Each structure stands twice: as structure tokens, then as C-alpha cells.
Amino acid sequence: MTSLPPPESERSRDTSLSASWHGDLQVLAPEAPASLRTGEVELLLSRWSEPQRRYHTVQHLVEVLQAIEGLAAAGEVDTVGARLARVAAWYHDVVYDPRAASGSNEHRSAALARDHLNALGVARGSVDVIEALVLMTLDHDASAGPAALASRRHTVEVLHDADLWVLSAPVARYREYARQVRAEYAHVPDDLFTHGRSAILSQFLQREDIYRTGHARRHWRAQAHRNLTTELARLRA
């Protein structure tokens, strides 16, 4: 049976994403043939569209990239850092299996990023930073990390906050996000999911600051606290 073409809005979205990818890779890997860059972005989009995903989808990728752009526009990171953060965003959940052991997805995503960016001809220093950024998303500890991130503090903070933007989303989007997370973990019994999810939300609420950049603290933090508190109360009811 012939498959239907994607809706126009989806095609437009993917075209915009591909243009962003090519723009960044033309700078990071100027010698890479266009066909190689195209093959990679098509692979990435197919990974982000896998059927087991409910939250970690192209929608999440778009939101992270948009958040990076907003933080860059607010002066939280320079042009080079924003580019590295965007490329890291493409890879940070490229491997995603909700049944995988803790940390497996992030480590496998980081390894894939290193292998594929090396094949594209990205400079070793940039590959090191991108790999480390992907691994940072494992525990969202923006203060730690390898030496590769020592001079990229603002880049780390921007990707950290962009990946957690959804916590500060408008109420309707946050509720959708919570439903998507539950759907992704549909194989987990309700009591175990409630316990694990409550622990994660509580950890974020107990942090001195959910976000690391000044812009996110000023504009995202209050809404994030409201969203997290509301969901936690619902889970405990």
C-alpha cells in the first residue's frame, strides 16, 4: 500500500529543521558533501519519529531548538556556543528506548553523536563538546562535566535550560507533556510510575534553581514551579 505524504505543516517543519541542520553543519563540517549532511539529517528525523516515542519526539526537538534560540537572543550564549548547543540537541535523545536501563539512552546517543560527527568531519574539539553536552542531559547537572566543557559554561547552561523548557510551558502544553510521558511509560504499573515520577518532580522542586541562565530564571522559573507543584499534587492525590 502506498503511504500517504506527511501533512503540509509537518513537511514545512521538517524542511525548516533540515535548513537549520545544514546551516550549522556547513560551518562545523565545511568539507562534508551535501549528500552526507542530508543523509544524516534524514536519519536523525527518522530516529526522532520512532513509534515508541510519545514525548521524546520531533515536537520536543523543535521546542529545545526554539528555546536555545530564545536564550541566544537574550544574550545567554555566543554564536559558536548556540551552534554547538543546537547540534547537541539533535543528538541528545536520538537513541530513545523507554524500557532501557537508566543512562543507556544518553550514553548510546552520545556515542552515536561522536561516531557520526567524526564521519562528517567535524573538528575533534567540537565533537568532544557535543558529546559532553549530550551526556550532561543524563542527570542535568550543568555544574559538572569533563574538561571539554570547561570553557563552554554558557553553552552547557543553555542546553540544560532548553531541554527543561517544557517544565515552564503554558498549562495546556505542560498537561500534554505529562500525558506524553505517561504514555511513553505505559508498560510501567501505575503505582511504580507514580512513585518514580513523584521522585523526579520533587528533585526538581528541591533544587535551589531549576534553571541556570538568568533569562530562564526570570521568565521560566515561576511557571515551572507552578506546573511541577500541580502535577505532584495530582500524583499524590
Image (cartoon, rainbow, N blue to C red):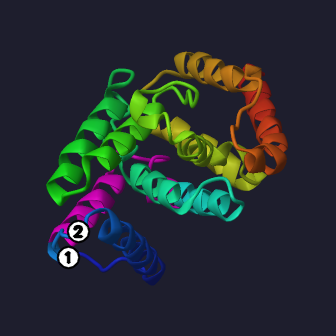
Image quadrant containing the C terminus: top right
Task: Kindly identify the amino acid type of the residue bearing the numbered disc 1.
Answer: Ala
Q: Please give the name of the residue rendered at 37% of the width and 68% of the height, measured from the top-left corner.
A: 21
**Residue toward you, 49 or 215:** 215
Q: Which residue is mark 1?
A: 34
Task: Kindly identify the amino acid type of the residue bearing the numbered disc 2.
Answer: Arg
Give the alpha-carbon distance from disc 2 to disc 1, as whole Å: 5 Å
Q: Please give the name of the residue rendered at 62% of the width and 41% of the height, measured from the top-left corner.
A: 178
Dot 2, how many residues are within 10 Å of its Cα: few (below 14), some (14-19), or many (20+)? some
Q: Secondary structure at mark 2?
A: helix
Does the rendering let one see residue 182? Answer: yes
Q: Which mark is residue 84?
A: none
Task: Determine if the magenta segment contains residue 183.
Answer: no
**Residue toward you, 236 or 66:** 66
Q: Position of residue 8 (x, y in %)?
A: 44, 83
Q: Please give the name of the residue rendered at 52% of the width and 57% of the height, measured from the top-left corner.
A: 82
Tell me which corner region of the image, top left, top right, bottom left or bottom right, holds residue 120.
bottom left
CB-based contact (under 8 Å), mark 2 and mark 1: yes
Q: Which mark is residue 37?
A: 2
Image quadrant containing the N terminus: bottom left
